[in-house]
Amino acid sequence: MIHNRAAFRLTGSCAVLLALAAILGTGVNFFRPAVTHLSWVGDWDEHIETRAFKAGVPVVFLIEARDRVNTQSSILFDARPIEQYLAGHLPGARPMPLDAVDERLSTYASLLSMDTPIWVYCSGEDCGDSLDLVLQLRTYGFTDLALYPGGFSEWKEYGGEIHMGDTP
Amino acid sequence: MNRVRPLFFWLARLAVAGLFLGACIAKIQDPAAFALSVQRYRIVPGEWINWIAIVLPWIECSTGLAVLAGTARWRAAGAALITGMLVVFTIAISLNLMRGIEVSCGCFSTRADASVSDVWNLVRNVSLIWLSLALFLEAFRADAARVSSTATS
């Protein structure tokens, strides 16, 4: 009986703590400045990582991206328009804009075989060109493909080295 | 022994509360980055992710403070919720490790270069579950004893 009463009090206290957290969380988010405000319902099903996961495309995060850049162990393609590539890109990246894939693949033919490890990025989380490029390369028969969804913006934000011009 | 026991519970309360209060700061500061961390577990529907990112850090905050409270009732509630959260977090991290998703757990940092989860995260969480469970039992018994003494007086 005593334990039942204590359990009842415990349940009530837990409910109060949860309600308090919900009120604080929604209240703070409501009054946040637009820069840090989080929309109440996010469109995560259309997020590039969700789409990659559904398509069975492996995803590379920042720490692995740094390793790959440092070791140059795989071919890195930049799926952004060529002007953006020339203005700054990840070390070792080669331009592969979506509107010139066939032309660029023939340029890099000597570097590539169907099982060459390839990873791709574009401008960042809001950009889908990198995933589109990976899916296109998959239809050409390339088998070892990965996506770096953080892309150029994340690389730059975390102090990654940037190369300029047409040198990979 | 009688001196060690209260000291142990005081230190345990400080450790568990400190961890949870520390863990909530980065998530409250940058809810969008925390939402991305939640999304990377791929275990909750997309519509829930932002709500979790908005409310969960405040649950960590309120339960962390509750564990430091003077009354056993609130300590028990805080420790019970913390134990529940730790069990859920441990299952989520285990699922990521089993699926080979090499990503930060999002526990204390939402930065993209935070260290990737490994088995040590599980060891730490299991230790914390044991600690928070001990806190819960101590506080719940103290509260039950208080209810009992009130009922008999």
Image (cartoon, coloured by chain):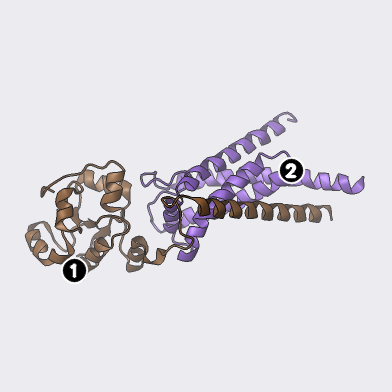
| The N terminus of chain A sits in image quarter | bottom right
x%, y% of residue B100?
38, 56
Tell me the crowding category of disc 2: few under 14, some 14 to 19, or many 20 or more residues within 10 angstroms, Cα based: many
Camera-side mark, 1 or 2: 2
Asked if residue A93 is positioned above or below residue A143 in the image, the reply reads above
Asked if residue A127 is positioned above or below residue A64 in the image, the reply reads below
The residue sitting at 66% across, 44% down in the picture is: B66
Please tell me in which quadrant of the rendered image residue A70 appears.
Answer: top left
Name the subunit of mark 2. B
Tag 1 secondary structure: loop
For this orientation, the residue located farthest to the bottom is A139
Circle 1 residue: A141
The residue sitting at 68% across, 53% down in the picture is: A16
Chain coloured purple in the rendered structure: B
Circle 2 residue: B72
Colour applied to chain A: brown
